[in-house]
Amino acid sequence: MKKGMTLLLSLIFVSSALLAGCGSNNNASSNKGDGNATATNAADATNAPATEEPVSSEPFEMTIRHTQIGADKQKRLAILQEVVKKVEGDVPGLTFKLDGVDSDVNRKEKLRGEMAAGNPPEIFDLFGSPDSKIYAKEGKLLDLTPILEELGIKDKFSNLDPFTYEGKIYGLPIGGSGEGFFYNKEYYNSKGWKAPTTFAELEQQLADIKADGKVPLAGASKAGWVPLMLANHLWSRYAGPDVTAKFATGEAKWTDPNVVKGFAKYKEWVDKGYFKKGELGFEYAEYTTQFTSSEAILLYDGTWKSSVFKAGQSGEGLIGKVGFFNIPPVDGGAGDQTALMRDVNNGYGFSASAEKDPRQLAAVKSFIKNLFNEEMQLRGLVEDGVLPAMKIDQNVLNENITDDLMSEIVGVLNNSQSSFPAFDSLVQADVTTEISNIQIQKLIGGQTTPEKMGEALQKVQEEANAAVE
């Protein structure tokens, strides 16, 4: 695991003396026409500045593949649409086509197929590690290093490791996130409870909620990544926050007893009826609805979920009634028991083909200039609950964080001593497919045991490790 990842939030909230140029207004297009060589020769002869041939204003279209679909992502989509208008105004003749696709479908199906065929969109939602490194190695991604240097923002990001390959930058994170429990404060207050500080206290609360006729935990496991958020944190509590990074190196195994304990604890909660019955058939949208309707009292999700508890959003009825806490320490757990899952893996990438087209390259530069700046980072935080991926002064953050939930989230993140990235940024694609599409659903459905799950995953892991040796 890279140290930069474990320090993400401390970097995000540390004052930066470099912020003055964050919203750089550098010209996004410095491309020259075919007549430049003649003009330059004439300039040398007369000591007059060279005259650039005007860039063509003929209509052309570029595609932006985004994942801002659904009611709870409308604010995020609105920010993107504003940027699109600015870029279209910057680049003569440009029209963007917005292509909205589910994030899981984009990452695991559409983008993979397009990369293999050599025809990805010009701009697209890109997962950092390991995806960006794989595509960069294959020459499919545009090297952004010179563009970031030109715009003066190369050093303005908290962590670019997930998008860096052989010292070059091939993508940009749109924001950071952490994961933990959202809880219904109104219900907790009615019971005289506080957020749990021990694992035993958490489990007692789950049992009491169940006995009260409520659903303790929201559940929606049709897409495996949803239950794996919590499962990932559980096995990291028992086996240590660095264990997942060791699977691909062979230093640790999915069959290790403490990893299996994490699987077993998740299965125990399933068997005790702590999740809504029928969860294997529920999509992610239903996951949120179970909590916003107060049917479920706890929701394990990413900090981005805070965006729904705002005016006009699906959870506005719970404004001021939602809290956030980290999973408490487990008895006998390995490593830092305050560790939290955090990453900066969600962002944008650009097709390598843009380098061959001056107008596409100008559009890419304008897109980066208009989206990756302090103003947009703060809007993402305030309007959508997305933690900044760029360095922002602590005083500026304090001035902009005005709601209690976000303040509580920031407090939880700052109180964790370390962090770890999600499993799917650390293991190979075949392993991710095995656990996300097969094993976690089999565990929830009672078709496998924690031990057999570990054995199946280790078999695929060893095959994946051998393939890269």
Image (cartoon, rainbow, N blue to C red):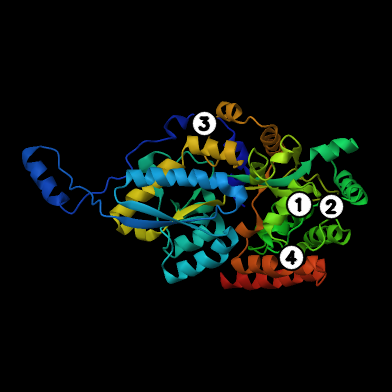
Residue 48, how many percent across, how many down? 11, 37
- The relative height of residue 188 versus residue 289 in the rendered view (above or below) is above
> Which residue position is annotated with label 3?
16
Instruction: Tell me whether circle 3 and circle 4 mark residues in contact (CB < 8 Å).
Output: no
- The relative height of residue 24 versus residue 266 in the rendered view (above or below) is above
Q: CA distance from mark 1 to mark 4?
A: 14 Å
Mark positioned earlier in the residue sequence (3 or 2):
3
> Which residue position is annotated with label 1?
290
Q: CA distance from mark 4 to mark 2?
A: 16 Å
Mark positioned earlier in the residue sequence (1 or 4):
4
Of 34 and 46, which appears nearest the observer? Answer: 34
Which quadrant, please, contains the C terminus?
Answer: bottom right
- How many other residues sit within 10 Å of disc 2, few (<14), some (14-19) or many (≥20)? many
Element type at mark 3:
loop
> Which residue position is annotated with label 4?
281
Q: Amino acid at mark 2?
A: Val
Q: How many marks?
A: 4
Q: Amino acid at mark 4?
A: Gly
Q: Is residue 61 left or right of residue 207?
A: left
Q: CA distance from mark 1 to mark 2?
A: 9 Å
Of 391 and 254, which appears nearest the observer? Answer: 391
Residue 49, how many percent across, how many down? 14, 38
Residue shown at 30% from the left, 45% from the top: 29
Instruction: Tell me whether circle 1 and circle 2 mark residues in contact (CB < 8 Å).
Output: yes
Q: CA distance from mark 3 to mark 2?
A: 44 Å
Mark positioned earlier in the residue sequence (1 or 2):
2
Residue shown at 74% from the left, 65% from the top: 281
- The relative height of residue 307 versus residue 227 in the rendered view (above or below) is above
Circle nearer the viewer, 3 or 4: 4
